[in-house]
Amino acid sequence: MKAEKKMLLRKSPPKKSARMVETIYGCKWSLTVYQLLARGINRPGEMVRSVEGLTTKVLNECLRRNMDFGILERISYAEIPPRVEYEVTVFGGKFMKILEDLEKLQEEIDRLQGH
């Protein structure tokens, strides 16, 4: 009997995007930062003042992590005093849509399990 050539290879998970989702959900402040940006709060000082328990140091780490992933971009204005704002990138908008879909999926799981 002649051996048939296999048509498919084993499918692997998307390593980089899975790590990104895990990292963002692992950062307890990223989702809060996204909410602030959606409300038009895009300056770091205003972000810290708007959220109980958020410190400048932790916010800067969170913003840096999100910039490293390409979710947020930093805009510096050549003004005195200096002004910095953060915006969601086009890629970041796509990523946030995936997070919204994950939240909807979790809500459905909770409903199915009676929670």
Image (cartoon, rainbow, N blue to C red):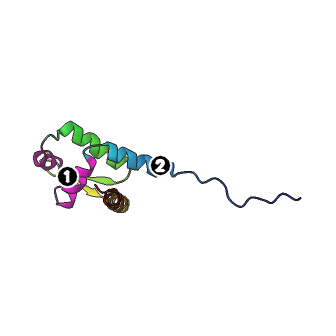
Residue 13 in view here: yes
Residue lying at 14% horizontally and 40% vertically, measured from the top left: 53
Q: Is residue 108 above or below residue 43?
A: below
Report helix, strand or loop for mark 1.
loop
Q: Quadrant of residue 108?
A: bottom left
Q: Main secondary structure of the magenta part?
A: helix
Disc 1 residue crowd, few under 14, some 14–19, many 20+, Cα 10 Å:
few
Q: Between 41 and 104, which is closer to the camera in this rendering?
A: 104
- Which numbered tag is attached to residue 16? 2
Q: Between 4 and 58, which is closer to the camera in this rendering?
A: 4
Which region is colored magenta?
A: 30-52
Q: Is residue 75 left or right of residue 81?
A: right
* Residue type at tag 2: Lys
Please name the residue that numbered disc 1 is placed on. 78
Residue 11 in percent (x, y) is at 60, 54
Q: Which callout, 2 or 1, points at the residue further toward the start of the chain?
A: 2
Residue lying at 13% horizontally and 46% vertically, measured from the top left: 51
Q: Quadrant of residue 1?
A: bottom right
